[in-house]
């Protein structure tokens, strides 16, 4: 029996590319990620996007106190996924209820996960045991690593990190993040 396969695109949003937390390295990986998304769609691999999502109270949150730059405010331009990588017929995921049935019944639509922390805590509702997950996106040392770690907690899930498809704040921090994810038994490809 073959494993279910997923491509997870982490936080490729306007604020992380050209907005409040502008990062030229995140912009530079967009063409590579676009190729991965196209490949996934052509080969029946489910594409899941994470979207960092904050409210107007961001500056009062723990993250806001450590990173005092409002970003990815819900429904703002900065919160949206960059145009080049827009999801196809997106279904926004809620852990329970009707949306889960829509996901099961519509395998061609991309899934969008709104998350308000670095890592999404509902992966077990989307990713079955013994699946294969490939990850791309930004920021490798923060949200990519947090989500990779969460995915590794699902029995038998194989996590691949495409090093040419992840960005970070510097090449040194990216390399350190890749080493940590490798230590957590992710495959660095």
Image (tube, rainbow, N blue to C red):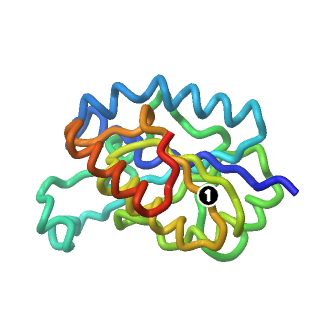
User: From what the image shows, is residue 62 above or below residue 14?
Assistant: below
Q: Is residue 97 above or below residue 165?
A: below
Asked whether, in this view, residue 122 is left or right of residue 59, the answer is right
| Circle 1 SS class | strand
Q: Position of residue 76 (x, y in %)?
A: 34, 47
Residue projecting furthest to the right: 1
Q: Residue at x 34, y 57 (%)?
A: 180
What x and y, as percent, mark residue 71? 25, 51
Q: Residue at x 56, y 55 (%)?
A: 159
Q: Residue at x 49, y 39 (%)?
A: 162
For residue 132, what is the image quadrant? bottom right
Snapshot quadrant of residue 130:
bottom right
Residue 74, visible in the rendered structure: no
Q: Is residue 4 visible?
A: yes
62 or 174, which lies in front? 174
User: Which residue is under mark 1?
Assistant: 158
Using the image as rendered, state which of residue 53 and residue 153 is in the foreground: 153
Residue 187 in the image: x percent, y percent? 52, 49
Task: State the residue at coordinates (54%, 73%).
Answer: 153
């Amino acid at each position: 029996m073959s494993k279910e396969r997923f491509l997870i695109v982490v936080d490729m949003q306007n604020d992380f590319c050209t907005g409040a937390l502008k990062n030229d390295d995140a912009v530079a990986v967009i063409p590579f990620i676009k190729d991965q998304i196209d490949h996934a769609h052509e080969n029946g691999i489910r594409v899941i996007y994470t979207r960092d999502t904050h409210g107007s109270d961001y500056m009062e949150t723990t993250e806001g106190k450590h990173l005092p730059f409002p970003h990815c405010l819900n429904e703002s331009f900065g919160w949206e996924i960059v145009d080049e990588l827009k999801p196809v017929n997106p279904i926004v995921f809620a852990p329970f209820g009707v949306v889960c049935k829509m996901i099961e019944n519509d395998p061609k639509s991309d899934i969008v996960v709104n998350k308000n922390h670095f890592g999404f805590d509902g992966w077990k509702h989307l990713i079955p045991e013994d699946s294969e997950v490939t990850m791309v996106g930004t920021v490798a040392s923060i949200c990519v690593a947090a989500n990779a770690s969460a995915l590794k907690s699902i029995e038998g899930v194989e996590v691949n990190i495409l090093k040419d498809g992840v960005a970070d704040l510097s090449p040194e921090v990216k390399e350190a993040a890749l080493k940590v994810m490798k230590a957590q038994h992710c495959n660095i490809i």
